[in-house]
Image (cartoon, rainbow, N blue to C red):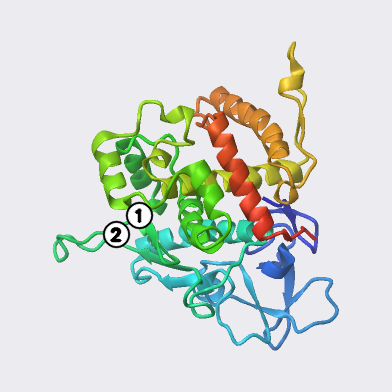
């Protein structure tokens, strides 16, 4: 994502930083400016961005001040206690349990990364309070004690704008065990957020729109029985030729999941390419055929009108990412192969997003 620097001293920052370790200024992310700013705090408790001479100032999100679980800001004159991102939380785990609190704090960071991407893409980000029918909400739930709830368990998923996530997914050991049990090459908290948000935006952008015919032509008919499709997938596994047609094995089970996996993959691409752009990364490999791997990363992927430009930049970078990981003895950072049908699906995702939200938020 964007490369942040302290507006007071210029020191490099990370997206979830709350204090500049170089100059000591308090930091806060301002969503409408898409920037992590340094603040001074007035005697009346109003936070003012360093260098700003006017305006009403800001105050930290309630989860910033009380739980160290967010670094986003709220306009000082707002009646809301929570920031744009935390206002989407409908349910959180019992924070009196220190383990649950730690996991929830990790979830908060990745949720904020998702919201950053949605804002950059110009997609609507509204909560259930403002938009009960079309709004978005998050339920972060902990598995109940099996001694008292033998038949109940938390299932990560989406239903009518509500994204449910098992907080245990933020535990690296648990998530890795599940990844291996399900034979998945890739499983991350951010990947969950991107996948489940895709179901929400299918409802918002595709379901009742002129895009539905194009969707069915590309992804298949979503009217196929979803429950039966999932049961068949978990009993029999994906079709043998799934890599030729789908971005993941799970994408093969139903058109809705194919869309969600493709949408999530698209967010992986634009966010990673934005990071490369912000760092000024370019590839000029020392090979006999440098053209196929040479790429100039100097472009804003969120604002790119052409999916082909994204692909032409993306594929060389993934080769470099995997090669660097292999040099460290680590698994491939990018364990995917993009076949022609998958590229076509990514292209449709790109078109739907850009034509439904034509004004991508520019970086200041």
Mark 2 vs 1, N-terminal side: 2
> Pointers 2 and 1 in contact (CB under 8 A)?
yes
The disc label shown at residue 90, or none: none
Q: Residues within 10 Å of mark 2 (few under 14, many from 20)?
A: some
Q: Is residue 225 left or right of residue 199?
A: left
In percent of width and height, residue 112 lies at: 56, 61
Q: Nearer the viewer, residue 210 or 148?
A: 210
Say the numbered circle drawn on residue 168: 1
x, y percent for residue 259: 49, 47
Residue 82 shown left or right of residue 133 in the figure: right
The front one of 320 and 341 is: 341
Q: Which picture quadrant has residue 292?
A: top right
* Label 1: few (<14), some (14–19) or many (≥20) C-alpha neighbours in 10 Å: many
Q: Is residue 192 left or right of residue 113?
A: left
Question: Between 231 and 168, which is closer to the camera in this rendering?
Answer: 231
User: What secondary structure is found at the residue carrying circle 1?
Assistant: helix
Q: Is residue 8 above or below residue 249?
A: below
Residue labelled with disc 2? 154
**Which quadrant, please, contains the C terminus?**
bottom right
Whether residue 359 is visible here, answered yes or no, is: yes
Q: How many marks?
A: 2
Rounded to the nearest whole Å, what is the CA distance between mark 2 and mark 1? 10 Å
Left or right of 32? Residue 319 is left
Query: Is residue 14 at all visible to an observer of this figure?
Result: no
């Amino acid at each position: 994502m964007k490369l942040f620097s302290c507006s007071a001293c210029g020191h490099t920052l990370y997206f979830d930083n709350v204090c500049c370790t170089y100059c000591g200024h308090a930091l806060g992310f301002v969503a409408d400016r898409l920037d992590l700013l340094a603040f001074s705090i007035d005697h009346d408790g109003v936070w003012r961005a360093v260098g700003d001479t006017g305006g009403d100032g800001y105050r930290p999100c309630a989860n910033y001040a009380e739980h160290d679980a967010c670094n986003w800001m709220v306009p000082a004159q707002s009646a809301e206690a929570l920031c744009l991102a935390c206002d989407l939380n409908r349910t959180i785990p019992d924070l009196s349990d220190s383990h649950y609190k730690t996991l929830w704090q990790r979830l908060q960071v990745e949720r904020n990364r998702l919201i950053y991407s949605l804002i950059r893409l110009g997609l609507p980000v509204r909560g259930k309070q403002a938009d009960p029918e079309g709004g978005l909400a998050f339920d972060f739930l902990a598995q109940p004690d099996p001694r008292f709830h033998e038949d109940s368990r938390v299932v990560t998923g989406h239903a009518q704008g509500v994204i449910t996530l098992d907080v245990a997914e933020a535990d690296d050991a648990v998530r890795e065990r599940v990844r291996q049990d399900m034979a998945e090459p890739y499983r991350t908290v951010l990947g969950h957020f991107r996948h489940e948000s895709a179901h929400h935006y299918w409802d918002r952008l595709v379901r009742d729109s002129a895009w539905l015919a194009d969707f069915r032509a590309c992804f298949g008919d979503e009217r196929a029985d979803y429950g039966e499709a999932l049961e068949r997938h978990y009993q029999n596994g994906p079709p043998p030729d799934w890599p030729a047609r789908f971005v993941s094995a799970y994408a093969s089970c139903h058109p809705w999941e194919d869309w969600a996996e493709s949408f999530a993959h698209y967010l992986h691409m634009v966010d990673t390419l934005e990071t490369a752009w912000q760092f000024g990364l370019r590839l000029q490999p020392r090979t006999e055929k440098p053209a196929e791997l040479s790429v100039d990363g100097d472009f804003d992927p969120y604002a790119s009108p052409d999916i082909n430009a994204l692909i032409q930049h993306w594929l060389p970078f993934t080769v470099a990412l995997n090669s660097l990981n292999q040099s460290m003895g680590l698994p491939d950072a990018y364990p995917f192969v993009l076949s022609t049908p998958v590229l076509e699906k990514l292209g449709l995702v790109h078109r739907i997003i850009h034509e439904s939200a034509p004004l991508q938020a520019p970086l200041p």
